[in-house]
Image: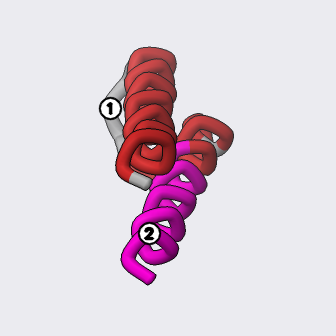
Amino acid sequence: MLQIIVKLIGVVIVLIGVIVIYDARLITKRYFGFGDKNEATTGLKMLGTIISTVGGMLILFIC
């Protein structure tokens, strides 16, 4: 039962990371108001990649 819960949490974390990667430009336009939007988009894509990797490792190694 615990393994199923951990896998579901890992899948949700991966899903959040993929959404951040895919919608990075829209998130930047909506929530950040500073001038250089390309840097913010790149930062969000890197953050999404790290989040997805952590979720994938959670699925792979914990269960």
Position of residue 27 relative to residue 52, above or below, is below
Residue 9 sits in which quadrant?
Answer: bottom left
- Give the numbered dot on residue 3: 2
The crowd level at tag 1 (other Cα within 10 Å; few <14, some 14-19, many 20+) is few
Residue type at mark 1 is: Phe
Q: In the figure, 18 relative to 46: above or below?
A: below
Q: Quadrant of residue 51?
A: top left
**Could you tell me which residue is drawn at 38 percent across and 38 percent down?**
54
Residue, far left: 34
Mark 2 is surrounded, within 10 Å at the Cα level, by few (under 14), some (14 to 19) or many (20 or more) other residues, namely: few
Provide the residue designation for mark 1. Answer: 34
**How far across and how far down the image is residue 49, in percent?**
48, 29
Residue 24 vs residue 31, the one in the foreground:
24
Asked if residue 31 lies left or right of residue 52, the reply is: left
Evaluate whether residue 19 shows in this view: yes
Residues drawn in magenta: 1-17
Q: Amino acid at mark 2?
A: Gln
Residue 48 image offset from top left, x and y in percent = 47, 36
Give x and y (percent) for residue 61: 40, 41
Relative to the observer, which residue lies in front, 37 or 2? Answer: 2
Closer to the camera, 7 or 28? 7
Q: CA distance from mark 1 to mark 2?
A: 43 Å
Residue at 56% across / 59% down in the picture? 11
Q: Is residue 25 left or right of residue 56?
A: right
- Does residue 27 appear in the picture of this structure? no
The x, y position of residue 20, in whole percent, is 53, 45
Q: Quadrant of the C terminus?
A: bottom left
Query: What secondary structure do most residues of the magenta stretch adopt?
Result: helix
